[in-house]
Image (cartoon, rainbow, N blue to C red):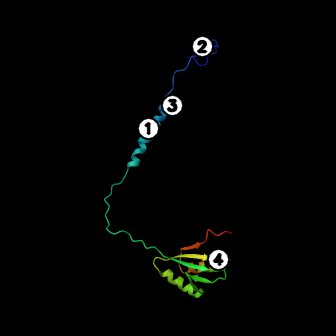
């Protein structure tokens, strides 16, 4: 069958051959890939593991709320404390196992200096878990 003939009077016939060689090549490559990767999915190390009767006990640390109002007054939970009282309570909280998580709530008009002093006091006592509490529902 001549595809590129220059004879315009020749009647065009329909091509009825399908070249399946590229499709077979692709299928063979995929077959080889699947044969090589299939053992990786079923590979497992068989171990005879010991059994334990008791489950692991996880102690949940409690949270401590420290609040600072617009005037810079400090509150431990709902109780008003001064700077010396805060230091004593932070030292006591640092000795607990597990250490409590501190939640710092500050009024939006609180000076940054007061917030930074509380953060520095907590860090100097060894308390590493400090979170900021905000009210996401308030409008600006």
Q: Residue at x 41, y 44 (%)?
A: 38
Label 3: which residue?
A: 22
On the image, the x and y values in percent for residue 14 come to: 56, 19
Label 2: which residue?
A: 11
Split into 4 quadrants, where in the image is the N terminus? Answer: top right
Image marks 2 and 3: residues in contact by CB distance under 8 Å: no
Question: With respect to residue 28, does 12 lie above or below?
Answer: above
Splitting the image into 4 quarters, where does residue 130 fall?
Answer: bottom right
Q: CA distance from mark 2 to mark 1?
A: 43 Å
- Label 3 or label 4, whichever lies nearer to me, is 4
Of residue 103 and residue 33, the one placed in the foreground of this image is: 103
Q: Residue at x 59, y 78 (%)?
A: 119
Total numbered badges shown on the rendered structure? 4
Mark seen at residue 107? 4
Q: CA distance from mark 2 to mark 4?
A: 91 Å
Q: CA distance from mark 2 to mark 3?
A: 30 Å
Residue density around tag 1, few if under 14, some if 14–19, many if 20 or more, within 10 Å: few
Q: CA distance from mark 1 to mark 3?
A: 14 Å
Image marks 2 and 4: residues in contact by CB distance under 8 Å: no
- Label 2 or label 3, whichever lies nearer to me, is 2
> Mark 1 or mark 2, which is nearer the start of the sequence?
2
Q: Is residue 43 left or right of residue 138?
A: left
Q: Secondary structure at mark 3?
A: helix
Mark seen at residue 31? 1
Q: CA distance from mark 1 to mark 4?
A: 66 Å
Image marks 1 and 4: residues in contact by CB distance under 8 Å: no
């Amino acid at each position: 069958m001549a595809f590129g003939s220059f004879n315009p009077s020749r009647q065009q016939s329909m091509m009825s051959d399908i070249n399946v060689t590229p499709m077979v090549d692709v299928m063979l490559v995929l077959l080889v890939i699947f044969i090589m990767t299939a053992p990786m999915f079923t590979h497992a190390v068989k171990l005879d593991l010991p059994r334990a009767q008791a489950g692991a006990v996880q102690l949940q640390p409690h949270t401590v709320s420290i609040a600072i109002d617009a005037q810079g007054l400090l509150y431990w939970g709902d109780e008003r404390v001064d700077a010396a009282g805060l230091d004593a309570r932070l030292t006591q909280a640092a000795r607990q196992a597990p250490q409590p998580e501190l939640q710092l709530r500050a009024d939006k008009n609180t000076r940054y200096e007061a917030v930074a002093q509380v953060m520095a006091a907590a860090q100097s006592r060894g308390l590493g878990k400090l979170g900021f509490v905000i009210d996401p529902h308030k409008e600006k």
